[in-house]
Image (spheres, rainbow, N blue to C red):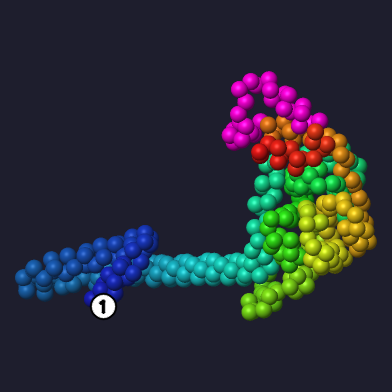
Amino acid sequence: MDVGRSAPRYQETALLYPRSTKLQSYLTEYFIVVVGLCRYLFKFGQKSTVKQFASSLSDAHLKTFQTHLDKRATLIKKQMDVSEAQESSGSRALTRDIFTYTSHQQRHATKMRVLDFCSTYDREIAWKQIRKAGNASFHMQQAEYREWRDGSDPSTLLYTGKLGLGKSVLLANIVDDISLSTEKERPLVVYFFCRHDVPESLQARTIVGSLARQLLRAIPDLAVLAKSCEYTHTTVDAEKVLELLVQGYSSDAKTYFVLDGLDECDNEERETLVQALQKIQENIKVLICASFREEPNNGLQSITKQLLATRLVSLPDDNPDIEAFIEADLERCPRQERLTIGDPTLVLDIQDALSKRSQGMFLWVALCSAC
């Protein structure tokens, strides 16, 4: 028997696999047999020499012990193989998880590098501010809007009107309307609102970059574009960003681009922007909705020629949304402490006066309530 050599080894094995209940059970049974063998040998040693000679060690007993030990040794070995395989499998699974997590982190970092290369401009601030100004329903009553929204080919819907007629409020509501679409495949809606008091928002590079960022954000893996986005000491123009967008955005899904305040850009920036939009429409299924102020010789005709399937909708001076805008604005005034009225009935008089004198100009109403 090699119990003397095997027992210490199995004792160490018990320490190596403490969580394997089957292996611990087999080891326990093995040592129970060892203890039984030791007790048998001890009792035999306690006998006198004459009795030891008379009885001698029984081969039958020793073979029984050997059979039990061999059986448990076999079970222990098999369970060790199983436990080792399980641990190896666990290690491989852990390695795969670590690799997957690392790969995900790398893809995310690469994607963010590409998106930041396109634009870091926060386009949501302007939209949120304008959207809070009020609701608009004028577009929902127009067949031109519904046809443009429900169309499947690249096209352009251009809202025109005098300064202050509510074009920005209208387009902010259009973003909401399209975003809440009930279509099976929800369309991607990107937007940009130019601000006359934010010079950066009037640059073609900023607008095209923001458009590219919003579109490319929908692409899971942008690794193919990463090499083109290495940061350099030179300024990247709109054309470079446009090439990146056309290369990386290959989705055939219908996409909407809502652009407010196109007229706020100077002629050079506007021309660069319109050319970029034209190229985008030629390569991507983009439906553009934009606003433009009505002024003499403002380049509107050039825009309608360059953009695809352009439809013009002029906002009327008696915009039906002005009444709701005035009412909502007057409701906000007391909460924002912009207006204190002792007699509640005066609100109706103020509302009536604003409605008559506004001539449909949202901006005039907003300026009056701010005074």
* Residue 306 as seen in the image, left or right of residue 48: right
Give whichever of 59, 240 is nearer the camera. Answer: 240
* Residue 44 as seen in the image, left or right of residue 35: left
Give whichever of 198, 171 is nearer the camera. Answer: 198
* Residue 56 as seen in the image, left or right of residue 167: left
Give whichever of 104, 153 is nearer the camera. Answer: 153
Label 1 sits on a secondary structure element that is helix
Magenta-tinted stretch = 331-356
**Residue 95 drawn above or below residue 234:** above
Q: Is residue 177 visible?
A: no
Label 1, residues with CA under 10 Å away: few <14, some 14-19, many ≥20: few
* Residue 315 as seen in the image, left or right of residue 368: right
Which quarter of the figure is the C terminus placed in? top right
Amino acid at circle 1: Arg
Q: What residue appears at the point 51 percent right and 68 percent down from the top-left corner?
A: 98
Q: What residue appears at the point 21 percent right and 70 percent down from the top-left corner?
A: 58
- List x then y, in percent, for residue 20: 38, 62
Q: What residue appears at the point 91 percent right and 58 percent down from the top-left corner?
A: 297
